[in-house]
């Protein structure tokens, strides 16, 4: 480093320290401290009180318990997989840990996206929001999109109905995530997810009540949360 570069570096450091002392931070205003790379995942605290309209307290309590199981198993799998890798193990048992991790981690994250967007005082879609404009441009209207999304959610199988955005192009699409981790559109961003595994609705709607459950979820979708993801 030459003398000019050194002096410039020292001056910048002094200026930055002075501004910080005056409460003027040169860093990004929304910068957050990095989490420890080996920190365990913690279950989010979702509180639905006595239940939501159309979703009983018993159903939601049971569902949240299942979600916490995904969090616990994700942490256990990450720990076991890393320990095996540090020991240089690469046999079938380790391979199966990796496969299982995709299922458990995806189950954890999808449940978080689902519960975060459920509310008993949900905001309706904002017609002026860019997401709603993109929905109208893609499907013709919100109602036409919902019909297609509901059809996705009621496909045969166990999984999730998902409204996706491709960050590379901005394109919207409805997708079916089989189980949690299969048929995933790689790189696409999940804006809205609806859990259509049986545990999400059977207690309230019976084994054949998935369509009624999806209808019940519709007014509970907090579009403030979904639109923020866009």
Image (cartoon, rainbow, N blue to C red):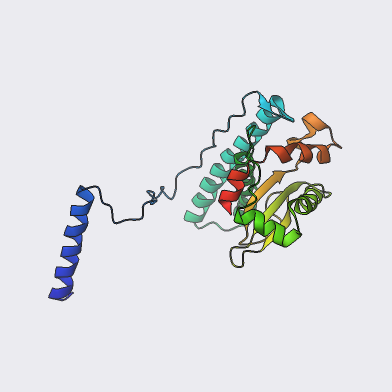
Side (left or right) of 36 relative to 103 = left
Q: Which of the pair 172/86 is nearer the observer?
A: 172
Residue at 45% of width from left, 44% of height from top?
Answer: 39
Q: Quadrant of residue 122?
A: top right
Tell me if I can see residue 87 in this picture.
no
Up-down: is 141 above or below 53? below
Tell me if I can see residue 55 in this picture.
yes
What is the x, y in percent for residue 187? 61, 62
- Count numbered badges in the picture: 0
Q: Residue extending furthest front?
A: 128
Residue at 58% of width from left, 29% of height from top?
Answer: 47
**In the picture, which quadrant includes the N terminus?**
bottom left
What is the x, y in percent for residue 221? 67, 41
Side (left or right) of 229 relative to 133 = left
What is the x, y in percent for residue 130? 60, 56
**In the picture, which quadrant includes the C terminus?**
bottom right
Q: Residue extending furthest bottom?
A: 2
Q: Residue extending furthest right?
A: 208
What is the x, y in percent for residue 202? 79, 33
């Amino acid at each position: 480093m030459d003398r000019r570069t050194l002096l410039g570096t020292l001056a910048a450091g002094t200026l930055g320290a002075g501004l910080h002392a005056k409460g003027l931070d040169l860093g990004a205003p929304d910068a957050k401290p990095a989490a420890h790379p080996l920190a365990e995942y913690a279950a989010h605290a979702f509180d639905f009180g006595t239940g939501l309209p159309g979703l009983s307290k018993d159903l939601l309590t049971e569902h949240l318990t299942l979600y916490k199981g995904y969090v616990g198993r994700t942490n256990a799998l990450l720990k076991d997989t890393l320990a095996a890798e540090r020991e240089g193990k690469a046999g079938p048992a380790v391979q199966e840990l990796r496969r299982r991790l995709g299922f458990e981690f995806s189950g954890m994250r999808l449940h978080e996206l689902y519960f975060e967007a459920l509310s008993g005082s949900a905001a309706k879609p904002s017609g002026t929001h860019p997401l709603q404009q993109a929905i109208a441009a893609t499907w013709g209207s919100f109602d036409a999109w919902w019909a297609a999304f509901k059809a996705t959610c009621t496909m045969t199988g166990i999984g999730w109905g998902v409204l996706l955005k491709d960050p590379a192009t901005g394109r919207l699409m409805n997708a079916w995530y089989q189980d949690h981790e299969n048929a995933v559109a790689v790189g696409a961003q999940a804006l809205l997810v609806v859990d259509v595994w049986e545990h999400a609705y059977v207690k309230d709607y019976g084994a054949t009540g998935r369509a009624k459950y999806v209808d019940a979820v519709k007014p509970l979708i907090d579009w403030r949360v979904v639109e923020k993801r866009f």
